[in-house]
Image (cartoon, rainbow, N blue to C red):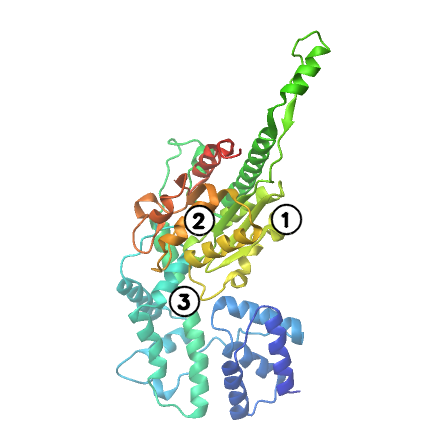
Amino acid sequence: MSLTKNEILNFSEFCKKNNYFISIEQLKVFFEYKNLKNLKNFEKELLYLYFLIPKSRQEQILFKNLINQYFKYSVATHDSSDYSLLEEYINEDNDLYEIFSDLNNNDFESLNELVRHTIENFGDIDFTRPVSDQYWLNQIKKSLKYQEIMEVFSSYQFDDLSKITNLINKNKFNNLLDLKILEILNEERNKTKDSYQPSELEPKTQLGELDFLYTDQEERRLLLEQTNQLGNKLAIKFKRHIKQSSKGKLHFRKTIRKSMQTGGFFQKIIMRPKILKKPNLVILCDISGSMALYSLFGITLLYGMVSRFSSIKAYVFIDGLTEVTKTLKRMRKNEIDTLLHNWNNFVKNDGHSDYEKSFQDLIDVNKKLQSKVKSLIVIGDGRNNYRNIPEELINSLNSQYERIYWMNPEKKKYWNTGDSQIRKFEKISYMTSEVRNYNQLRDFVNNIDFRKILK
């Protein structure tokens, strides 16, 4: 049994419907390899398809599941971990042949040395910034040293068959190299964690002061539960102040008439009904790479609010705005993190933070609604990948909201450094706060006062 061209193309369409895109170039490489090797074995064809298409470990997991769903076949990868030692790799200018030989013998010493040298060559890494290890990996992958390592695979003259084998080696090595970099980054990050002595803080206080970025799975579960409750509290707080603002001015004539029934005593005051447009609260959460784990806590806060009150609108953004109000309303509490699993769904352009585009989208939405929204809460670090944010946009944003509150998960000492443009938003924000842990989040919620802006 062999895979036909139509079957592969139909499988490609199936992958696309399940948020996994296979490019024409990738399919072309596979078909060339299939012809060169004269592959007519179903299992081998799927195995090589599995090794040629995905570019990362995460993609491999997804792609393997898609193969299983479509072809009802589980790809066995245990016998394909070895590297093919091509004669072309024997070169005095690099150690690729030696590294591959060591890896085939389960010796990772050469690779670990290469990884550490790559990280050291990148420079100092500040683990106090609110970004994940994946963020630093992406930065390292842009470095000259990393690119030099991967360019080695392009420095040989191969025949057609060896060219495909080299590509398979390259993909496997690239995945392993990234995994090793993440392992070492994680080791280094753990060394920078602030430690508490048991006598210094009570357990509850200690958890409340723990940076969200340094939480383990159980700590995160507890803190996310409390964050959801904070969202409920903020929604109730908002709703209560709307009700308090619903009474109009004194209706003098009706009050006098009513007092005549009691001999002129004002036992009941009659107020004129106050007709208000339904006030809205808008919340934005930055879910770009630099926001790391903080996005999960931000979205949990959003969930706690929109699940309690209908006039609250929730948006997420990377390089453009996406409303998630209805999505959050349909979710169960234990499904919140699945929203971040579909990160690519929220990418509008290049996947890098673009506050100008995202806030312009928000301004455009407000113009369509033709109403001035009272309050805006933003969760984001203000880092805009060195893109400019024009003053006109800041002024337009300021004119559309009576009160803007801003939660920044980055340490205050890093504000307005590098590509941070938080200073531009501070000019129009009523309250800009560092929010890296639960205690700071609780204080932020407690300090919001909607009464001053509801008229």
Q: Secondary structure at mark 1?
A: helix
Residue 333, given in percent of the width and then of the height, sits at: 61, 46
Q: Residue at x 63, y 50 (%)?
A: 331
Q: Badge 2 is on which residue?
A: 397
How far apart, in angstroms, are the residues tagged by discs 2 and 3? 41 Å
Q: Secondary structure at mark 3?
A: helix
Near mark 1 (Cα within 10 A), the count class, few <14, some 14-19 or many ≥20, is: some
The amino acid marked with disc number 2 is Leu
Near mark 3 (Cα within 10 A), the count class, few <14, some 14-19 or many ≥20, is: some
Q: Secondary structure at mark 2?
A: helix
Q: Is residue 290 visible?
A: yes
Instruction: Kindly report which numbered mark, 3 or 1, lies closer to the viewer in this rendering.
Output: 1
Q: Earlier along the polypeptide chain: callout 2 or callout 1?
A: 1
* For residue 109, above or below residue 204: below
Residue 401, given in percent of the width and then of the height, sits at: 47, 43
Q: Nearer the viewer, residue 111 or 369?
A: 369
Q: Nearer the viewer, residue 38 or 84?
A: 38
Q: Badge 1 is on which residue?
A: 329
The amino acid marked with disc number 1 is Lys
Mark 2 and mark 3 residues within 8 Å of each other at the beta carbon: no
Residue 58, given in percent of the width and then of the height, sits at: 51, 66
Taking the image as shown, residue 340 lies to the left or right of residue 107, namely right
Q: Earlier along the polypeptide chain: callout 2 or callout 3?
A: 3
Q: Residue at x 60, y 28 (%)?
A: 248
Residue 270, given in percent of the width and then of the height, sits at: 66, 21
* For residue 368, above or below residue 275: below
Q: Nearer the viewer, residue 75 or 128?
A: 128
Q: Badge 3 is on which residue?
A: 178
Q: Among all residues in the image, which is located at the extreme right?
A: 261
Q: Quadrant of residue 135?
A: bottom left
The amino acid marked with disc number 3 is Asp
